[in-house]
């Protein structure tokens, strides 16, 4: 492992890669800060820029963007009470009241220190857990992978559906349907192309991500008449206050950070869960841990209440890399986008990545840590200046997002059919979003579609067409039982709410 | 009887699933693969049925949480303009090249979204796209096809 860490450090600490982490963190912070635009959009917008890079550099840039976007989301939560991403909603509970009390600088500093500490602790967990899990996952067979993918898709539907599980499951099916367009991987038979040559190779992953996130988010902002920058006028350098944290506040943070880090990391590892659930659970857990006097301060600017969700959401980000790097199965929408990018570089993540491309495996892990250091030492002092980006009018912001989306697709194929297709999918996605049909399950399903069909094919061929493969192996059975429990829990909670 | 938008979308999804399933059953597979436990049709058929079952459930079951959208607050005019501009952009990008089409697209989008600061609109379209192209093509060595710039000798 020491050797791996050194390989990772030597790759991540090259001048180009350090520059990429800095650029990524900076760009991610700016994009993540804009309400409505989260890490998925930020990473998707970076994909065209990474075309000319080697895989490690491209992934390091994306990891930087990821952490930057999460930090940026916290900034808009604290300053505007407008979370950039769902994972930072809980940050606003106590961060915004602190900002209203004239302690915005302090709130941002607490958020940055907590994110850094949470990210550091979980990066250490990742260092230990990922190689061990890689070895375990080598014993996984096709039925286990198939069951794991079913679990991942069910879990993301359950957690991202806001109580509308059926809608999320419909998006899963739609994502899988889109993934079947084009040539069948084994027989080369074309499916659902309707004799259109442009569809023979299937629909590109970048196109789907750009259409369902970047472009449809831009259209949604316009459609809803939302101005992501409407409160930006309130921000000025003088109103942010000091970023210094006193001894008492440091002690409070020191108590909160370890437990929230562990919780955040564990939630992040679970397929489908992630930063949002981790931050809410950490907030709730922290409220139960503190004394009665502190409990009263929750929602009014509590240090515990701000530190807990910030620590947990960053810890969950690192945790979500565990299933991606070790099993090749992303646990969240954001890691699904990163999986797509990895596949674009010709790298198949999974248990063998640790052996076949150790420099990528370790450099991504090390760059996460470097990214957090960069966020702390570069972004925190720059926050008063970066916050001014919130004043960019949407009249400029939206066309620029559309421009990046179209450029990404144009660079890939130099063909306008793909641009037309992207616009069509983006329009449909905009209407679906309007009625709360979630997009992350669609993306995850689209990314996993090919692999899912492949593992189902192998499983059915091995069992000679019998469904016995679903219960023959204990691992498969356990994973499927967990899936069934999630489905029944969803049905039960629906029934309970109704009564 | 008024059908809720969610149920209407579910109905459209049901129609899509039926069509998908019909197309899936009609996928031509090799003769030797016809009775295999798994062929190119199998997975799409499962998906088609899954789509039909899920959308039917959504239509049949009563709505526990309703998503209310106030159409008066939706800016249809701007979004229609943006979509039309985007479609025109996609249609002309190959003919007039990336630089001119993208710059015009940005300029027109700023205009239709209500911007009237002409100087800023110009800077954030033509020079901005030129700088972006230089970043991609000149610095990052990412090939950016532009027949027009090639024709006038700006790009190699």
Image (cartoon, coloured by chain):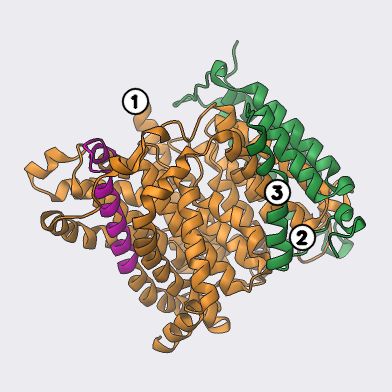
Pointer 2 residue? B39
Q: Are marks 3 and 2 on the same chain?
A: yes
| Labels 1 and 3 within one chain | no
**Distance between the Cα atoms at labels 1 and 3?**
61 Å
Q: In this view, does A166 lie above or below B114?
A: below
Residue position for label 1: A499
The magenta-colored residue range is A96-121
Task: Name the residue: 19% across, 48% down.
Answer: A303
Discs 2 and 1 lie in a common subunit: no
Residue bearing mark 3:
B127
Precedes in sequence: disc 3 or disc 2: 2
Q: Which element is circle 2 on?
A: loop
Picture residue at 74% right of the left edge, 39% below the top = B105
Tag nearer the camera, 1 or 3: 3
Q: What element carries label 3?
A: helix
Q: Quadrant of residue A374?
A: bottom left
**Chain A's colour?**
orange
Residue found farthest to the right: B151
The question of residue A119 being in magenta is answered with yes
Give neighbour class at mark 3: few <14, some 14-19, many 20+ (Cα, 10 Å). few
Judging from the image, what is the letter of the chain drawn in green?
B
Quadrant, the N terminus of chain A = bottom left
Whether residue A262 is situated above or below residue A214 in the rendered picture: below
């Amino acid at each position: 492992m020491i050797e791996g860490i050194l390989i990772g450090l030597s790759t991540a600490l090259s001048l180009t890669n350090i520059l990429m982490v800095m650029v990524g963190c900076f760009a991610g912070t700016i994009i993540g800060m804009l309400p409505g635009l989260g890490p998925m959009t930020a990473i998707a917008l970076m994909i065209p820029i990474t075309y000319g890079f080697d895989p490690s550099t491209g992934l390091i840039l994306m990891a930087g963007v990821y952490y930057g976007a999460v930090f940026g989301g916290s900034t808009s939560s604290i300053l505007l009470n407008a979370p950039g991403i769902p994972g930072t909603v809980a940050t606003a509970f106590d961060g915004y009241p602190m900002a209203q009390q004239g302690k915005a600088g302090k709130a941002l500093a607490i958020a940055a220190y907590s994110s850094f500490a949470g990210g550091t602790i979980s990066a250490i967990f990742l260092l230990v857990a990922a190689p061990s899990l890689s070895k375990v996952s080598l014993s996984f067979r096709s039925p286990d992978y198939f069951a794991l993918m079913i679990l991942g898709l069910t879990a993301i539907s359950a957690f991202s559906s806001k109580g509308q599980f059926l809608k999320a499951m419909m998006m899963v099916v739609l994502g899988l349907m889109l993934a079947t367009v084009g040539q069948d991987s084994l027989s080369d038979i074309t499916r659902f192309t309707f004799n259109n040559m442009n569809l023979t190779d299937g629909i590109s992953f970048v196109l789907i991500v750009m259409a369902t996130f970047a472009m449809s988010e831009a259209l949604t902002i316009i459609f809803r008449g939302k101005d992501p920058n409407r409160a930006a006028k309130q921000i000025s350098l003088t109103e942010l206050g000091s970023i210094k944290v006193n001894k008492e506040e440091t002690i409070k943070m020191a108590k909160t950070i370890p437990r929230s880090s562990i919780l955040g990391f564990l939630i992040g590892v679970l397929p489908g869960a992630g930063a949002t659930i981790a931050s809410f659970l950490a907030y709730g857990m922290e409220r139960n841990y503190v004394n009665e006097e502190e409990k009263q301060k929750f929602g009014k600017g509590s240090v515990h209440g701000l530190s807990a969700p910030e620590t947990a959401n960053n810890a969950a980000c690192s945790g979500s890399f565990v299933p991606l790097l070790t099993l090749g199965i992303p646990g969240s929408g954001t890691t699904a986008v990163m999986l797509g990018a990895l596949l674009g570089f010709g790298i198949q993540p999974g248990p063998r990545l640790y052996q076949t491309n150790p420099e990528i495996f370790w450099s991504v892990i090390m760059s996460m840590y470097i990214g957090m250091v960069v966020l702390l030492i570069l972004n925190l002092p720059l926050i008063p200046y970066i916050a001014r980006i919130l004043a960019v009018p949407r009249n400029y912001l939206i066309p620029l997002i559309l421009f990046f989306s179209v450029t990404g697709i144009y660079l890939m194929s130099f063909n306008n059919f793909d641009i037309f297709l992207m616009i069509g999918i983006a329009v449909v996605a905009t209407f679906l979003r309007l009625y709360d049909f979630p997009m992350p399950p669609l993306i995850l399903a689209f990314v996993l579609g090919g692999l899912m069909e492949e593992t189902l094919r192998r499983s059915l061929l091995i069992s000679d067409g019998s469904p016995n493969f679903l219960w023959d192996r204990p691992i498969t059975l356990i994973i499927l039982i967990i899936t069934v429990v999630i489905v029944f829990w969803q049905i039960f909670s629906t029934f309970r709410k109704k009564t | 009887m008024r059908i809720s938008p969610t149920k209407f979308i579910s109905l459209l999804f049901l129609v899509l699933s039926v069509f998908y399933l019909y197309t899936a059953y009609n996928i031509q597979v090799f003769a030797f693969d016809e009775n295999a436990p798994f062929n190119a049709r199998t997975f799409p058929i499962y998906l088609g049925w899954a789509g039909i079952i899920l959308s039917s459930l959504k239509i049949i079951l009563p709505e526990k949480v309703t998503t209310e959208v106030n159409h008066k607050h939706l800016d249809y005019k701007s979004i229609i303009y943006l979509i039309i501009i985007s479609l025109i952009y996609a249609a002309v990008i190959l003919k007039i090249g990336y630089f001119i089409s993208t710059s015009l697209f940005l300029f027109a989008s700023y205009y239709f979204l209500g911007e009237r600061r002409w100087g800023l609109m110009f800077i954030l379209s033509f020079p901005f796209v030129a700088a972006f192209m230089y970043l991609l093509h000149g610095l990052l060595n990412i090939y950016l096809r532009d027949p027009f710039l090639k024709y006038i000798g700006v790009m190699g």
